[in-house]
Image: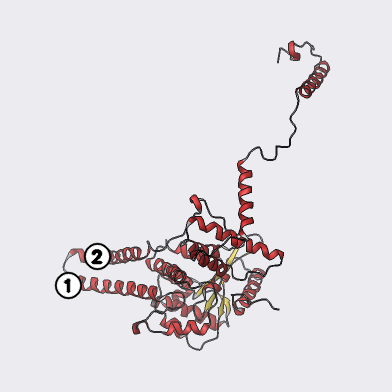
């Protein structure tokens, strides 16, 4: 029991066990059609958490959708079917399904809601999703553990049809990048009290702060974009009233589309150049080889750490990490936080103190495999070549068998020079 604790909280590990149990129960009780399942994480509240009310990134409709889902959880003691779009729309008085879908995407991106599992029968038939609702945004390390597609979801959300979803997803990624550039380990567990204190600080009082998934800079930017959009709508309405007698302002739909388009363009120019899906190469543009132990989530984080290094330095870091993993099989102390270990290697590299050690064998083995693939004669060097005498004996034996076959078929057995039938 002297092993150091994992970076994932014990509560999250317990939740992981509960999720597996819930998945098995959902499979056993599956009906005819797909049905999503949901868990609520946290204490039971008679009122809604103040954090969701004060969240500076969520729009009112996002908060309302969270509350409606929470009401469903409260009425069924925490283990219930996820309310469908129609049920959410009726309770929240939201007529647009796309608005509800947009809110759920933003809640997942900001880690108020987690997609923990996709439930399927042994035949592969889809039964539904398992969601977890939180009373405060989940730490990144826990989100990566529970939602194996979280980083992929953020990158996919960069192309979402709604500008606000794109902006929030980009904001999360920019916040991760800002933390990495500041030397902060993004995949380590923070004390919950520290996270809550940081979220309570008012940005209007000056000084940097963060709100759970978002750094202070990103919070202010997202709030500024939202405020600018709202002002644009108000300004547009004022112009419409002033020009109400003009034909071009009588088409309300066209006016609203123009405002929406303006906001999309503004958001895109604010973020698109700052964050995108990272594709890194090594020395000479060669593709990087990542340790197989890294999950897709952790690979995306690794890319964000490696991109500040020179291309010729990146593969050495990954080889050292793979070598450290292999050393565990020989009795070395296990690595419980892969990204933190990689982060320390990157820091040593930036300081000029990194010296390859365990990664040397990994590199040499990879280069040897590459050399073998390029050499077509590999594996044939020890093959003994046939002599002329052996070839003539083999040829004579073949002709003899051929002669027997012709005789059996009643064919003439005449042969030309060189032992070859001239008819062939």
Picture disc at residue 242: 1
Mark 2 neighbour class, 10 Å CA radius: few under 14, some 14 to 19, many 20 or more: few
For disc 2, the marked residue is 251
Q: Quadrant of residue 42?
A: bottom right
Picture disc at residue 63: none
For the residues marked 1 and 2, what is the alpha-carbon distance in whole angstroms?
15 Å
The percent position of residue 162, horizontal first and vertical second, equals 39, 65
Q: Circle 1 sits in a helix, a strand or a loop, which is it?
A: helix
The percent position of residue 319, horizontal first and vertical second, equals 59, 58
**Dot placed on the residue nearer the N-terminal end, 1 or 2:** 1
Q: How many marks?
A: 2
Q: Is residue 398 visible?
A: yes
x 28%, y 67%: residue: 259
Q: Is residue 333 above or below residue 289?
A: below
- Figure quadrant of the N terminus: bottom right
Q: Circle 2 sits in a helix, a strand or a loop, which is it?
A: loop
């Amino acid at each position: 029991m002297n092993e150091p604790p994992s970076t994932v909280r014990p509560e999250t590990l317990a939740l992981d066990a509960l999720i597996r149990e819930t998945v098995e129960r959902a499979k056993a009780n599956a009906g005819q059609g797909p049905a999503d399942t949901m868990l609520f994480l946290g204490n039971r509240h008679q009122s809604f958490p103040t954090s969701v009310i004060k969240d500076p990134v969520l729009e009112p409709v996002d908060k309302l959708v969270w509350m409606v889902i929470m009401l469903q959880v409260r009425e069924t003691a925490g283990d219930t079917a996820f309310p469908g779009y129609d049920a959410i729309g009726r309770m929240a008085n939201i007529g647009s399904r796309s608005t509800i879908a947009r809110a759920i995407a933003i809640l997942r991106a900001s880690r108020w809601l987690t997609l923990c599992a996709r439930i399927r029968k042994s035949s592969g038939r889809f039964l539904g999703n398992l969601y977890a609702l939180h009373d405060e945004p989940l730490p990144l390390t826990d989100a990566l553990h529970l939602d194996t597609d979280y980083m992929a979801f953020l990158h996919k959300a960069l192309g979402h049809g709604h500008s606000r979803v794109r902006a929030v997803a980009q904001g999360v990624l920019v916040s991760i990048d800002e933390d990495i550039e500041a030397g902060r380990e993004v995949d380590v567990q923070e004390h919950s009290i520290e996270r809550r204190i940081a979220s309570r600080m008012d940005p209007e009082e000056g000084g940097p702060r963060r709100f759970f998934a978002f750094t202070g800079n990103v919070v202010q930017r997202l709030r500024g974009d939202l405020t600018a959009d709202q002002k644009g709508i108000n300004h547009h309405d004022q112009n419409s009233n002033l020009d109400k007698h003009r034909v071009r302002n009588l088409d309300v739909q066209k006016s609203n589309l123009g405002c929406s388009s303006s906001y999309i363009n503004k958001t895109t120019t604010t973020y698109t150049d700052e964050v995108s899906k990272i594709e890194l190469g090594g020395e000479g543009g060669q593709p990087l080889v990542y340790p197989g132990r890294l999950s897709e989530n952790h690979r995306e984080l690794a890319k964000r750490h490696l991109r500040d290094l020179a291309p010729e330095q990146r593969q050495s870091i990954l080889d050292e990490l793979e070598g450290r993993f292999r050393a565990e099989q020989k009795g070395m102390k296990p690595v419980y936080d892969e990204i933190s270990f990689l982060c320390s290697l990157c820091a040593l590299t930036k300081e000029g103190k990194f010296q390859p050690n365990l990664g040397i064998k990994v590199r040499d083995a990879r280069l040897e495999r590459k050399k073998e693939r390029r050499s077509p004669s590999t594996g044939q060097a020890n093959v003994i070549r046939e002599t002329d005498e052996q070839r003539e004996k083999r040829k004579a034996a073949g002709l003899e068998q051929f002669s027997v076959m012709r005789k059996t078929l009643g064919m003439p057995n005449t042969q030309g020079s060189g032992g070859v039938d001239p008819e062939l």
